[in-house]
Image (cartoon, rainbow, N blue to C red):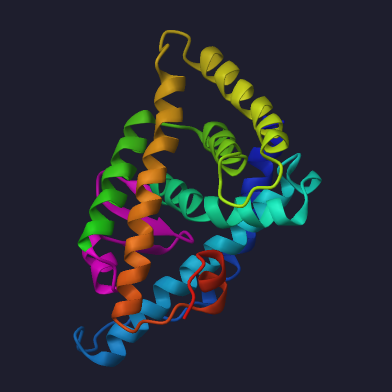
Amino acid sequence: MIQQLVAAQLQCNKRSFSDQPKVTPWPLGADPQSRDARQQRFAHFTELAIISVQEIVDFAKQVPGFLQLGREDQIALLKASTIEIMLLETARRYNHETECITFLKDFTYSKDDFHRAGLQVEFINPIFEFSRAMRRLGLDDAEYALLIAINIFSADRPNVQEPSRVEALQQPYVEALLSYTRIKRPQDQLRFPRMLMKLVSLRTLSSVHSEQVFALRLQDKKLPPLLSEIWDVHE
């Protein structure tokens, strides 16, 4: 099961790399405060977010058990978990030496870049703090894949019709992560609970993200249809 999850993630990542040329270029050389430059940076980030959402949906479909759920529950789980998985993937791409985050192999961003793209400091700082904390844990590909699967199958999400079924599907991934961490680092008995606590932190970050989306609307920055749909943004 673990090998299947890791292979699915690698496959989805490779597909995402092919979308790199389609992303609006980050403006270089132009007046950084010009309206066009600000719009271009925002478009650049939203297009990266779309690629990430598509990658998450592709991965979820390959997670054993997900397609056994009814369509309503699939949608409910994806809508609720997508931003949290995006934040996990962001943390995975964090470089503690440069304090930057890299997407699609070649796109690297500092805190300032996130701010220039239109995100608020109140959202940016927690992203980087979470990324640093995840870096200290030192998760490998298998642990990230299992943690994401556990996150997807969260039975307490809004509008889930069959929570007991979702919980039953989550349990094997929880047990697999526990077994894996005990084998990998038997001396670190707190590693497993620390990882699960990161899922609690993600709930808080998800709330901050909702505030960020609301702030973007106040700035009259329109999200693309896919992001509006997945994050329940109603114009």
Occupied quadrant, residue 7: top right
Q: In this rendering, is residue 195 above or below 25?
A: above
The x and y percentages for residue 99 are: 25, 50
- Quadrant assignment for the N terminus: top right
Q: In this rendering, is residue 136 above or below 48?
A: above
Q: Residue furthest right?
A: 68
Q: Nearer the viewer, residue 21 or 86?
A: 86
Q: In this rendering, is residue 165 above or below 18?
A: above
Q: Nearer the viewer, residue 3 or 64?
A: 64
- Whether residue 38 sits left or right of residue 151 in the image: it is left
Q: In this rendering, is residue 225 above or below 83?
A: below
- Whether residue 187 sits left or right of residue 41 in the image: it is right
Q: Residue at x 48, y 9 (%)?
A: 186
Occupied quadrant, residue 34: bottom left
- Whether residue 70 sits left or right of residue 23 in the image: it is right
- Residue 184 lies in the magenta stretch: no
Q: Residue at x 80, y 44 (%)?
A: 68
- Whether residue 95 sits left or right of residue 67 in the image: it is left
Answer whether residue 26 is visible to the viewer in this image.
no
Answer whether residue 208 is visible to the viewer in this image.
yes
The x and y percentages for residue 22 are: 54, 78
Q: Residue furthest top?
A: 187
- In this picture, which residue range is highlighted in magenta? 94-120
Q: Nearer the viewer, residue 29 or 158?
A: 158
The x and y percentages for residue 207 are: 37, 53
Q: Residue at x 53, y 31 (%)?
A: 143
